[in-house]
Image (cartoon, grey):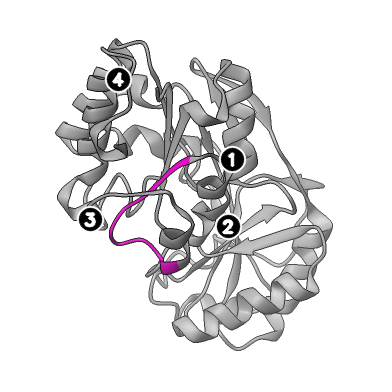
Amino acid sequence: MIKLVLTDLDDTLIPKGQDGASDRAIAAIHAMLDAGLRFGPVSGRVPSAMGWMFRGDERCYATGAFVNGQVLRVGGEDVRTIWIDAEPLRATQRILDSEDLGAFLTVYDLYDPAQVFFATKRDEWLGHHPTIGPDHHVQMSRAELTEPRYVKTNILCDGSREQILALRDRLNAEVEGLDFVMPSNVAKIIDIMPAGWNKGTATLALGEMLGVAPDEIATFGDSENDLAMIRAVPNSVTVANADVDVAAAARWHIGDTQEDAVAVALEQIAAAAETGGMPVFMS
């Protein structure tokens, strides 16, 4: 029986371009919770993004793992935070400043979405970046990282997909203490995580906190940053639009995100709780 569902959000539960989870998905989450099961998002996004992603329904994200598992939440309370030391981030910035890809180390505040800045000595690039308005780049830029540690950081890059993948590989080879992964098959972003800590370790940590065994957890994902979570438990699930490596690692496969496939799967998990069995798509 599945007792805990942990799912990625972007391009898994929520299709690209949709402004939050669908009514059907939110209703399915409530059906699970009403049946005594547990649900949580496991997202690269910060906790403050959950409000719009779940249309203000706090019950949907009272438990979960955010910032790729660096912030663990149970029952509406943050119970663990995994920090990143500034020194490997400074090493990352030096590499990015040496490249000509318009790539910037981006730092976020966990609870204030308006507080974001780019750490770069190449400030002249910011005003020409397609996703950064020319009127905003000055106040969003800092030449140095001044704090001893951070939580949410990633890399915004204006290169081609091939260039971004090559940059990811270079960073993984040259920067100690950090792991660099792709959070999306389409977005020009590289996620940064503490080495050895990821959505997979967060999944197992949440399961232990909640008293749920690994074979009672279902994980849903689509991208490289979901791969550790997909490999962490026996009942892993990918959507039809998943990255090929993620799909190959998963045990179960469902329809496309655009078809609200995760919502359908959640409905089946909630229904199966009545008999203590497994959902239809896992049979």
Residue 243 lies in the magenta-colored region = yes
Question: In the figure, is residue 157 to the left or right of 5?
Answer: right
Q: Can you name the residue that lies furthest to the bottom here?
A: 100
Pick whichever of labels 1 and 2 is earlier in the sequence.
1
Q: Secondary structure at mark 3?
A: loop
Residue 109 placed where, x, y %?
57, 43
Observer-side mark, 3 or 2, equals 3
Above/below status of 169 relative to 59: below
Q: Residues within 10 Å of mark 4 (few under 14, many from 20)?
A: many
Task: Name the amino acid, label 1.
Answer: Gly
Q: Secondary structure at mark 1?
A: loop
Q: Which mark is residue 256?
A: 3
| Residue at position x 21%, y 51% in the image | 18
Q: Nearer the viewer, residue 111 or 7?
A: 7
Pick whichever of labels 3 and 2 is earlier in the sequence.
2
* Residue underneath mark 2: 117
Give the alpha-carbon distance from disc 3 to disc 4, as whole Å. 21 Å
Q: Nearer the viewer, residue 182 or 32?
A: 32
Give the alpha-carbon distance from disc 4 to disc 1, as whole Å. 22 Å
Above/below status of 182 relative to 234: below
Q: Determine contact: label 3, label 4, CB under 8 Å.
A: no
Observer-side mark, 1 or 2, equals 1
Stretch in magenta: 235-244
Observer-side mark, 2 or 4, equals 4
Pick whichever of labels 1 and 3 is earlier in the sequence.
1
**Quadrant (top left, top right, bottom left, bottom right) of the N terminus:** top left
Instruction: Write down the quadrant of residue 23 in the picture.
Output: top left
Q: Residues within 10 Å of mark 3 (few under 14, many from 20)?
A: some
Give the alpha-carbon distance from disc 2 to disc 4, as whole Å. 38 Å
Q: Secondary structure at mark 2?
A: strand
